[in-house]
Image: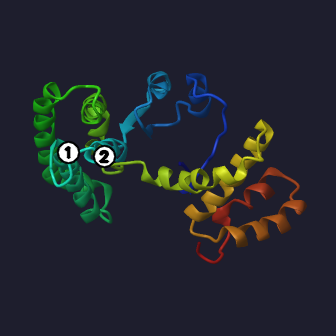
Amino acid sequence: MANFSQQPIVIYHYSPTRRRDVVMQLLNDEVKTLMVDGYEGYQHACHEYKITRLGCMAHARRKFVDAQKLQPKGKTGKADQAIAFIQTLYRIESAIKYLSPEEKYQRRQKESVPVINKMQRWLEKSLPNIPPKTKLGEALRYLHNQWPRLIRYLDDGDYPLDNNLAENAIRPFTIGRKNWLFSNSQAGAHASANLYSLVETAKANEINPYEYFREIFSQLPNATCVEDIEQCLPWNFTLTPA
């Protein structure tokens, strides 16, 4: 997700690879903060453009959930403890959701930092005792490797704990893509990305996508300049909420 004139924007981009030059093209030095998973292809761009990189706690939690599923039925273990730590952090975030960034920062320092410190001590103690190739070992090592990025949200009240906004925007595509196997050209993929971008940006701005498309399909044929096209962006309409 991106922010344009304080308006939420969801952008889909198609690329046949995940090479770092693709990331370099998508980002620039105007981007100040980026939240992504552990894929290291992002790091070169973050270094070159001096972007603060945040880690997503939801990705870390997901790995412990996978490990938890392999535990003997009725037994609890380290995966449960990790999930409990993370759930405590989420409860704090839920309680401060509507506070100002400065108030969020102060509450995180008071309530989240002690949990983080306790979790770090637990991680350092647990890490040497679990085989690295087990699901639990993989989860612990992901948490360990991403730790500086995962706790960076504590530095600023504007930083989120996870990138679930982006995950939720991707979900409709991932659920439906098996139904769209007929769209098998790169041109079709680019066209689809453009349409998904408009639909999800409309939703992010709380307007009904169907009504939005009806409006722009009637207005776009009369557009004669860039300004006319910009007027067709979702936040310039007052329509039924999504």
Closer to us: 121 or 96: 121
Which sits earlier in the primary sequence, circle 2 or circle 1?
Answer: 2
What's under tag 2, amino acid-wise? Arg
**Residue 235: percent from the left, percent from the top?**
63, 64
Q: Residue at x 54, y 54 (%)?
A: 171
The dot on residue 61 is 2
What's under tag 1, amino acid-wise? Ala
Q: Given contact means CB atoms under 8 Å apart, are the residues at marks 2 and 1 in contact?
A: yes
**Residue of label 1:** 82
Residue extending furthest toward the bottom = 240
Closer to us: 190 or 148: 190
Q: Give the side of residue 89 with respect to residue 1, left or right.
A: left
**Residue 121: percent from the left, percent from the top?**
10, 35
Q: Residue at x 37, y 38 (%)?
A: 54
In this rendering, the answer to whether 4 lies above or below 39 is below
Q: How many marks?
A: 2
In this rendering, the answer to whether 13 lies above or below 129 is below
Q: Residue at x 10, y 31 (%)?
A: 125
**Residue 120: percent from the left, percent from the top?**
15, 36
Q: Is residue 122 visible?
A: yes
**Residue 111: percent from the left, percent from the top?**
15, 53
Q: Quadrant of residue 96?
A: bottom left
Dot 2 surroundings within 10 Å: few (below 14), some, or many (20 or more)? many
In this rendering, the answer to whether 47 lies above or below 120 is above
